[in-house]
Image (cartoon, coloured by chain):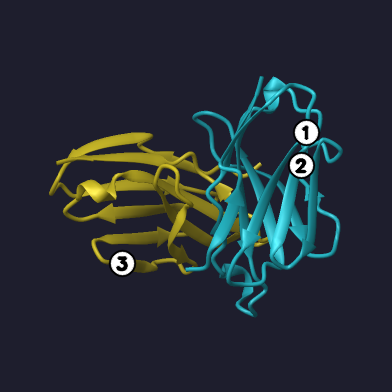
Amino acid sequence: ILNVEQSPQSLHVQEGDSTNFTCSFPSSNFYALHWYRWETAKSPEALFVMTLNGDEKKKGRISATLNTKEGYSYLYIKGSQPEDSATYLCAFRSHTGRRALTFGSGTRLQVQP
Amino acid sequence: GAVVSQHPSRVICKSGTSVKIECRSLDFQATTMFWYRQFPKQSLMLMATSNEGSKATYEQGVEKDKFLINHASLTLSTLTVTSAHPEDSSFYICSAASSGGQGLNTEAFFGQGTRLTVV
């Protein structure tokens, strides 16, 4: 059974604060690590697909890093805004040829105006 | 990004009845559909994977006769919860991926999910 863990489980920050979350995953048989942003009553929205050790990806104020050797990824949000409030999911894809993802339980972010 | 429409978003049914959930890819051909289930405060858990025109592959512990999956076309997959019981109450969400020639790192696009309550 693959174990993908995210921390913290939830986070409350003030508007303008920068924040980061952690996703840990198995370091063996790594193929890809996905980050999703999930707002209530909407579909999870893909943020990043990361494949290479040392990858750093950025989309606006959100960025992510990847360490496949030690099995973790960080998601950073710079200058949080209320519209960033959502659950952030990471998902691991192993090198078994299967396309299904193994998800963490998510980090719920609440940004207070 | 691509659009996946899942319907209904919320359903309440009586114990013993069956419920069908639809997942449609609106602007691409979904060769593979994934069905996930999420219990409160838990992760999305894969239930089954279906490829268009072939039988679904179920994860360990998921009863294939209870959760019927049909993927008869490249734009539609359905999950039918048969003889539903209160313990089947959960959040069900589909995800669709195309073959795309882009390998295994293509994004999977999600529906909005269905909240099933069995009373």
Q: CA distance from mark 2 to mark 1?
A: 7 Å
Q: Which residue is mark 1?
A: B18
Residue B19: % across, % down = 73, 36
Residue at image x 50%, y 59%?
Answer: A33
- Which amino acid lies under the numbered mark 1 shown in the image of this protein? Ser
Vertical side of B93 occupied by A11: above or below:
above
Question: Which residue shows up at 56% across the image and 42% down it?
Answer: B9
Q: Residue at x 69, y 65 (%)?
A: B75
Q: Can the viewer see residue A69 in this picture?
A: no
Tag 2: amino acid: Thr
Answer with left or right where residue A111 lies relative to residue A90: left
Marks 2 and 1 belong to one chain: yes
Are discs 1 and 3 less than 8 Å apart at CB? no
Colour of chain B, in one word, is cyan
Task: Tell me where residue A78 sits by quadrant.
Answer: bottom left
- Residue at 61% x, 72% y is B28
Task: Report, in whole angstroms, how far the alpha carbon at label 2 lies from the one at label 3.
Answer: 38 Å
Residue on which disc 3 sits: A59
